[in-house]
Image: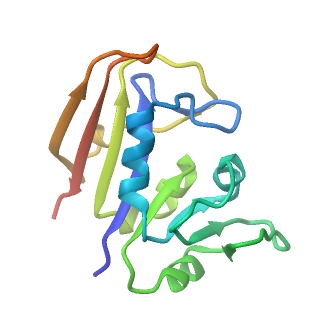
Amino acid sequence: MAEVLFIVARATNGVIARDGAVPWAISEDLKRFKRLTIGKPMVMGRKTFESLPGLLPGRRHVVLTRQPGWQAEGVEVAHDLASALALVGDEDFAVIGGAEMFDVFAAHGTLFELTEVFEDTKGDVVMPSPADDPTWREVARESRPAAGGFPPYDFVTFERVG
């Protein structure tokens, strides 16, 4: 079975986005995101794709959208879960957002990589922590101090229980 990796940065108050973008640009978090996704298909919602600076090199972009005619250069488009899963096939892949995508793929997730940002952030998209979900178990944590104008944060890895 393929590994289905969920990747998200989340504030203490649950915020994961503000005005269509991630509220932080923490260099180490961005490097970690690249390391975790390089060479893998990334599955995302349309708004998440539109928030990217463009196509990210070395990764397939699969966008799940309800908009029938939507397309973008270099993107594989799916309109339902089954067609998104068919596009990635047996490959390991990463679900990178938005919040609704984590719900859509909930039954398929095997690993959850969370950047836990220790601040209450203003934003308009929130999601619960995997720590509050008994189907996920924390297996690793690396703490980082506040630096460069960013609050402290932890890189936390969860595995699916069972």
151 lies left or right of 68: left
Residue 26, picture quadrant = top left
16 lies left or right of 35: right
48 lies left or right of 36: right
The quadrant of the rendering that contains the C terminus is bottom left
Pick the residue in front: 54 or 94: 54
The residue sitting at 34% across, 42% down in the picture is 114
14 lies left or right of 109: right
Q: Where is residue 123 in the image (x, y as percent from the top left)?
A: 61, 25
Is 108 rendered above or below residue 12? below
* Residue 128 visible in the shown view: no
The quadrant of the rendering that contains the N terminus is bottom left
The residue sitting at 48% across, 38% down in the picture is 127
The residue sitting at 32% across, 48% down in the picture is 113
Residue 8, picture quadrant = top left
Colour scheme of the rendered structure: rainbow
Is 2 rendered above or below residue 106? below
Residue 75, picture quadrant = bottom right
The residue sitting at 68% across, 46% down in the picture is 51
Q: Where is residue 117 in the image (x, y as percent from the top left)?
A: 38, 26
Q: Position of residue 42 (x, y in %)?
A: 51, 65
Is 125 rendered above or below residue 151? below
Residue placed furthest toward the right: 69
Disc tally is: 0
Q: Position of residue 79 (x, y in %)?
A: 68, 74
* Residue 149 visible in the shown view: yes
